[in-house]
Amino acid sequence: MTGPSSAAGSVATGSVLIRSVRPYGEGDPVDVLVTDGEIAEIGTSIDAPDDIEVVDGNGAIVLPGFVDMHTHLREPGREDTETIRSGSAAAALGGYTAVFAMANTAPVADNSTVTDNVWRSGREVGLVDVYPVGAVTVGLEGKQLAEMGMMASGAAGVRMFSDDGKCVSDPLLMRRALEYAKGLGVLIAQHAEEPRLTVGAVAHEGPTAARLGLAGWPRAAEESIVVRDALLARDAGARVHICHASTEGTVALLRWAKEQGIDVTAEVTPHHLLLDDSRLQTYDAINKVNPPLREERDKVALRQALADGIVDCVATDHAPHAAQEKCCEFAQAKPGMLGLQTALPIIVETMVNPGLLDWRGVARVMSERPAQIVGLTDQGRPVAVGEPANLTLVDPETSWVVHGRELASLSDNTPYESMSMPATVVATLLRGVVTARDGEVTR
C-alpha cells in the first residue's frame, strides 16, 4: 500500500529521559532514554547529559501511544466546532499519537485536494499524526464511487475510506468499493445502518424509547448490514471494518464471520461500553448518538467481545457539536459526543477495573490492533529498545472530574459532565517529542 509514513511528519525527533515508569504496568520502575525519536535504552538509574529534557514519571505506566481509527475534526467547514489544531490537542492530552479524521467535512473529503490539505494541516500542527479518511462515494451520497485511487496515491496516502455518518447501503456499490479497495490495498470502514429501517429514528428501539415516545432505531438496522458486508467481503476477498459496533447481535455476527475466515474487523466506542439508554429519561440531547445508546445486555456483550478480541479495538467517534446543535429538542439535535480525552479513563472503568483487560490488553485495543488494521508501521509498537518513541504515560491512581469547558475541544458536548474519571494521562510523546504533559499541550 502506498502512503506516507508517520515518521515523515513535521515533528522533530527529540532526546528525552523518562524517569521511573513501568512498561505495561509490570515490574519495578525503570528509566527510558529516548534519542533521535527512538527508545535507546531501558534500565535503572540511566545517566544522561545535564541538558537533556527529563520527564519524571513517578511510577506511571508507560504504553505505546494510542491510535484512534475514528474521529471527527470538522475541518474543513465547521471550524466553529473543532479544528485540526484543537482536535489534535484533545488527542494528545488523551494519550493519542495518531488519529484518523473522518470524511464528512464541508467540502466532503472525497478527493485528493481535501485529503492532502488535511494531511498537511496535521503535519503543521504536529501534536499527533493526522490521517485523513477518504469518502467511499462522491459527496457521501451513496451513488458514485469516489476516486479512491487518487486519494491513496496523493500526498496523504489515504489508507482508509468511509462514508461514516451514512451507510453505503447499495449492496452493488459496496461490492464494487470492496473490490476496488482490495486492488489498492486499502480498507473500507462501514457505518452499518440500513437507512430504510431508521427513518425518523432517534433512540434505540426498546422499552425506554417506547415509554418516552421516541422513534426507535432497531438492532436489525445495524446487524443486517454487518452480515451483508461480511459476505460481500468474503466474495471479494477484501477487508471490511465495522464502525462503532453497538449490539449483542453484531457481536454474534462478528464471531461467526471470523470463524468463517472472513477478513472483518470492528471497533467499539467508549460510550457504548459505559452508557446505555436509561440515560434518555431526561430527554437531554447530550446523550443522542448514532448508533444510539443501547441496552444493558448490549453493553455487557460488547465488553466481553472486546476482551475476547471479537471486537478488535476501541475508537472514540469523537464528534464535536456547537451548543445550539445539542441544546434543542431531542429529535432535532445532532448525534455525537466528545471522546478523545475521556477514552482511556472509560476503558479503565469498564475493562481494567472489572478485570476484563490488563494494561497489555489496553495497549492491544487502543494502540496495537488499530495500528495493525490501518497499516501503520511505526505506531502501536512495543515499548522496547529500538522502537519508535510514540508513548503515553498513565497514572492509574489519580482521578479527575470532567468539565466540558475545560477540555481542549472547541465544543463541550460531553455526556460525562461532572463525572469522576479514573486514571490520568501524565504525558504523551510523538517520536520522542513531548506533545502533552501534566494536562497541557507543549507545542
Image (cartoon, grey):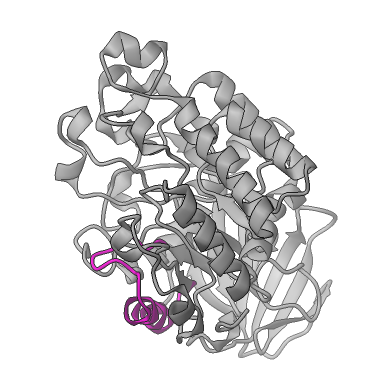
Residue at 61% in and 90% down: 51
The x, y position of residue 293, in whole percent, is 43, 29
Tell me if 95 is positioned left or right of 401 in this view: right
Above or below: residue 443 compared with residue 64: below
In the image, which residues are magenta? Answer: 102-129
Magenta stretch: includes residue 125: yes
In this view of the protein, which residue sits in the foreground, 134 or 357? 134
- Left or right side of 239 for 30: right
Q: Inspect this view and state whether residue 427 appears.
A: no
* Quadrant for the C terminus in the image: bottom left
> Which residue occupies the foreground of this view, 265 or 301?
265
- Residue 236, given in percent of the width and then of the height, sits at 64, 58
Question: Is residue 244 or residue 273 the one in the foreground?
Answer: 244
Q: Position of residue 356 (x, y in %)?
A: 73, 35
State whether residue 10 is above or below residue 82: below
Give the quadrant of residue 180.
Answer: bottom right
Q: Residue furthest front?
A: 172
Left or right of 16 on screen, residue 400 = left
Q: Does 249 appear above or below 384? A: above
Q: Which residue is located at x 56 percent, y 82 percent?
A: 3
Q: Quadrant of residue 337?
A: top left
User: Number of labelled discs?
Assistant: 0
Q: Position of residue 239 (x, y in %)?
A: 64, 58
Q: Residue 14: tell me if it is visible.
A: yes
- Residue drawn at 77 percent across, 67 percent down: 382
Residue 255 counted in the magenta span: no
